[in-house]
Image (tube, rainbow, N blue to C red):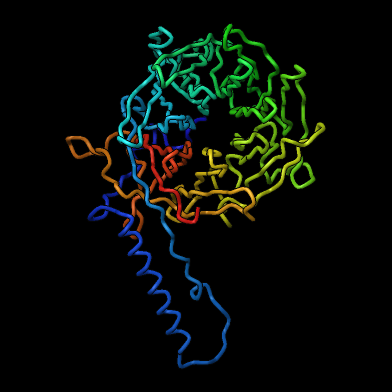
Amino acid sequence: MMAQSPRESNRDRLRLLPPPPGPITEETLNKDLNMRLKSILLLALAASFSASNIPRAATAQDKPAAPRRWLAAAAFVIPKETAPDGEGYFSIVCGHNGRLYIGTHANAVNSWLVEFDPKSEKMNVVVDAHEAIGADATGFAAQAKIHTRNNVGASGKIYFGTKQGYPAEGETREDYPGGYPMVYDPATGKMKVYPIPVPHHGINSIAPDESRGVAYISTCSDRRPGPGENAIFLILDLEKGTYRELMDTEHYYGFIVVDYLGRAYHPILGGDIARYDPRTDKLERLKQTIDGNPPTDQTRLALTPKPDPINWDISPDGKTLYAQPMSGNGLYAYDLTAEGDMLPGRSLGEVISGAASVDCRALCVGRSGRVWSATTERAPEGINLLHLVSYRPGDAKPTDHGPVAIRNPDYTTFTGPDGKQLPFHGGLYQTADGRATTRHVIMGVCEGLDENIYILALHPYTLLQVPLPVNE
């Protein structure tokens, strides 16, 4: 999914504001919040004892915006040589060993899988895509992105794939040979590379079912968002390395999930859902409902011919599918135990209450069963303000834990020897009250095994570590 942040032509206009004096810590954030709450309380008391007792209509001035309740995050820069444009995608997962595995993007060059160890706070490159496949192509022929929603098999192996970047003038879509499904074993450090499944297509999604010796693949022709996008739903035999095509779903950036019965799901352009059942070897086409009715345009779950990418993830027991469209402010849940050719879904509520414009490319379900959404809203400051939102099964609605501030805004070098801002380093913004936060859309989220939530931010490509909110 291409990051919708300013590219070369206008990034020079992005300005990194100087950090506030002294480090931003959780303690200082809490002190500042307490002071603001006390001030509001004193103002309210003063107003109640006003000499004038004449009733009057409330005005906008009587209802100031509530102070933001910030979450404090630690920031870690992802190795800049692996993401020279400061960009990446929703390629992040937590392994069984508690380490994170992050895909990167170096347009026209290569891509890498980076491992982050929360204990040592160190990052290491564990897979060089070109080295793994034995290629040295450049330009549009390069394996420029790891764009997949990385997944972990029961064995602990990491499943991911490579994808095309952006063609330069004079290059054609056919210059790209195609993407490779890959499997990395953290226990041994060994790699396995599978053949290109569809010529000239990148790999967008890979979901393993190791118990049956298969993985499910979704490709992308990158003629997004449509009409004309091709997204082939396939089965990969993990032992033989052969493929079987199920259908062209035509839905760009489709995620695949595998349920408790081993059935694999993929969205189809127009709102239907493909489901392959390995027990019967049949592909079904399901209709969907939301609260008993077909999904409306407002849900953004069934748009055509230009659909929203739909963030999907599945509950640990494989019985509930969660979804949030990229530009939709709603979270939805589907009952995968339902019988028949209709998949019943229900609305769980707004993700950010009252937000007029949102963007979500980062949704996950953790091993705890909680759903996490890193969603941005268009804020008055003109930035895409990051909120961390969660939903626990049984909750009345999603919980917005608030916006995220970076407590160590000097986590990397932002300027060169000449004092000028480095290219693709304009992703931070300083608020009026001195906090550092991100300004662009967010590209990935996952729940760690260490009581932290991890988020991918842009410019430079950055990993944010947010402690589990206290009310979780």
| Residue 276 at x, y percent in the picture | 72, 22
> In the image shown, does 374 or 60 lie closer to the viewer?
374
Q: Residue at x 17, y 36 (%)?
A: 418
Q: Is residue 24 left or right of residue 455?
A: left
Q: Residue at x 49, y 47 (%)?
A: 376
The quarter holding residue 135 reads top left
| Residue 158 at x, y percent in the picture | 48, 23
Q: Is residue 287 left or right of residue 263?
A: right
> In the image shown, does 402 or 57 lie closer to the viewer?
402
> In the image shown, does 248 or 189 lie closer to the viewer?
189
Measured along the vertical axis of the image, is residue 243 above or below residue 24?
above
Q: Residue furthest right?
A: 340
Q: Is residue 139 left or right of residue 266?
A: left
| Residue 386 at x, y percent in the picture | 46, 48
Residue 217 seen in the figure: no
The quarter holding residue 289 reads top right
Measured along the vertical axis of the image, is residue 236 above or below residue 300?
above
Q: Residue at x 68, y 39 (%)?
A: 301
Q: Residue furthest left?
A: 417
> In the image shown, does 358 or 282 lie closer to the viewer?
282
Measured along the vertical axis of the image, is residue 221 above or below residue 325?
above
| Residue 197 at x, y percent in the picture | 58, 11
Residue 58 seen in the figure: yes
Q: Residue at x 52, y 27 (%)?
A: 151
